[in-house]
Amino acid sequence: MYKTGRMINDHEDLKTVVESLKALGAKIVLTQGSYDLVHIGHARYLEAAKKAGDVLIVGVDCDEKIQQRKGPDRPVVPEDERLEMVLHLRPVDFVILKRNDDPKWHLIKTIQPDVLIATEDAYTKEEIEELRSHCKEVVVLERMATTSTSAKIRHLQITTAEKLEKTLTPKIVQLLQETLSKVREG
């Protein structure tokens, strides 16, 4: 795994860092997500999130959490690589892995950010009101790419299936015809 002082592996360690930063007057911003197949929408989103404060912390979902939400073929990129990729994005100050067995909103409750950044489909209106008791402000951003990672993966799957159909179907039909001819001659 990629090692850096910006990768924090323990929520309590992150809480200590955040408390120190807050004591220095820093405005803490938190956002969370899968970040599977990092694309321009992720970069734009994190850039917008960083503008909401001084320090941007990104919680990255573990592989198991993503599999439960998006299916057994996801994530495409393993968590160690996703964590490292997110660290390479300029606006990101710290990253932490969100484990599957973490209680609901554990990271949010632990660090109590000044600003929580979310996408429009992340929380219900009721949840946003409840979240305000754990952070000073909740900012909902629109998605910043024309397609999501899931849509890009679906497109690749459909394109591959269409190519296979065009190349394999004639070969399968020919093979079946040859096999039937041999059986009839038989």
Image (cartoon, rainbow, N blue to C red):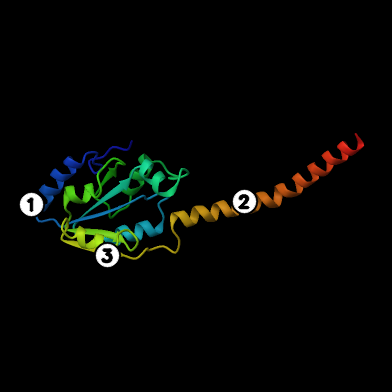
Please state which amino acid type lies under the numbered disc 1. Answer: Ala
Q: Give the mark, 2 or 3, whose residue is nearer the N terminus.
A: 3
Which residue is the extreme one toward the top? 186
| Label 3 sits on residue | 125
Side of 163 relative to 22 (left or right): right
Do we see residue 153 in this rendering? yes
Q: CA distance from mark 1 to mark 2?
A: 56 Å
Q: Position of residue 147 (x, y in %)?
A: 45, 61
Which numbered mark, 3 or 1, is in the foreground of this view?
3
Q: Secondary structure at mark 2?
A: helix
Contact between labelled residues 3 and 2, with CB atoms less than 8 Å apart: no
Looking at the image, which residue sits at the far left? 23
Using the numbered discs, state the Cα–Cα distance from disc 3 to disc 1 in whole angstroms.
31 Å
First in sequence, mark 3 or 1: give its number: 1
Q: Report the disc number at residue 161.
A: 2
Mark 1 neighbour density, 10 Å: few (under 14) some (14–19) many (20 or more)? few
On the rendered structure, is 135 left or right of 70? left
The answer to whether the residue labelled 1 contacts the one labelled 2, judged by CB atoms less than 8 Å apart, is no
For label 1, the residue is: 23
Percent x, y for residue 148? Answer: 43, 58
Residue 40 located left or right of residue 128:
right
